[in-house]
Image (cartoon, rainbow, N blue to C red):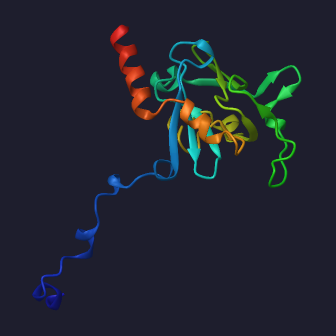
Amino acid sequence: MAEAEHMNIAPIEDSIEEFSVFQSVTERYYTRRFCVDGGGKKGEDHCVLFHSNRICLITLALSHPILKEKKEIRKIDFQVSHNIDRLKNKVSGKGKHGAQFLQPDSPLCYIECVDSSKYTVQSCIKGKLVEMNDALIENPKLLIEKPDAEGYIAILLPSINNSNQQREELLTLEEYNDVVRKRTTQD
């Protein structure tokens, strides 16, 4: 240690920046895009996280009432119609054979909160349903506590032909923030 002090070498712990400045995996590898007023319902905003490999995570935007008001979730229902249960989506192989093909307005799930409010989460993009996050059944709080990580709702794979187009049709973070700002001044 005396030799290090003599050479004016700072202790190693002083060379590490504050950990809060490091980006999360989501921030490093995904491009955020936003779909506002999902299903025509004001404020029911969704976030689509686009990875460079085309995989997309669907989650709720921070302005969605569930996150904004930190609502307690009673139930998440993946049975979106009489004969379609999103949890029964079985995918195999590189081409994702057997995956359910979704349109932007296709429901992924229904969320019922303790205050009796109900919300429909839509896919927001066209693509194959790769996976539903069944961890939300056991722990629906993940949706609120970690919406950009373990609390994602679904993973979709848009076609290679229109992945970039779909990303560009959704709002950027700046455009989304402008919409949210305008909403708060109108309310």
- Identify which residue is drawn at 49% across, 29% down: 171
Residue 110: x and y in percent read 69, 22
Residue 1: x and y in percent read 19, 87
- Identify which residue is drawn at 54% across, 35% down: 168
Residue 64: x and y in percent read 51, 23
Residue 141 seen in this snapshot: no
- Identify which residue is drawn at 36% across, 8% down: 186
The answer to whether residue 106 is above or below residue 146 is above
Q: Nearer the viewer, residue 110 or 130?
A: 130
Residue 149 found in image quarter:
top right
Q: Nearer the viewer, residue 78 or 116?
A: 78
* 6 relative position to 92: left or right: left
* 68 relative position to 72: left or right: left
Residue 183: x and y in percent read 40, 14
Residue 12 found in image quarter:
bottom left
Residue 111 found in image quarter:
top right
The answer to whether residue 172 is above or below residue 24 is above
- Identify which residue is drawn at 81% across, 50% down: 95
